Amino acid sequence: MNATFNQILIVDSLPEGQLNTAARLFADAQDWARLIGDVPHIASVRCYFQRFPS
């Protein structure tokens, strides 16, 4: 079975103020993708979660 992919999706779900490793990973992955011709596409999304009182 041959498998190919064309996108790396980085999901950032850490609360604001926390060490943002997703931003660093996104920047590093983009740099590598540029070196090999922008394949795969690098995408990043930020998820916001709301804490409910317990």
Image: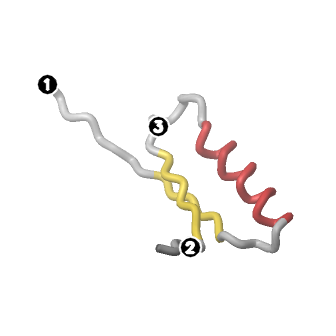
Structural crowding at the residue carrying mark 1, measured as other residues with C-alpha within 10 Å and reported as few (<14), some (14–19) or many (≥20): few
Q: Nearer the viewer, mark 1 or mark 3?
A: 3
Mark linked to residue 14: 3
The x, y position of residue 41, in whole percent, is 65, 70
**Residue placed at 64% from the left, 64% from the top?**
42
Is 23 on the left or on the right of 27, as rendered? left
Indicate whether 37 appears above or below 12: below
Please give the label number shown on residue 54: 1
Q: Which mark is nearer the camera, 2 or 1? A: 2
Which residue type carries mark 1? Ser
Q: Earlier in the sequence, mark 1 or mark 3?
A: 3
Whole-number angstrom distance, CA of label 1 to CA of label 3: 20 Å
Read off the residue under disc 2.
4
Determine the secondary structure under disc 2: loop
Tell me the quarter of the image containing the C terminus.
top left
CA distance for labels 2 and 1 = 44 Å
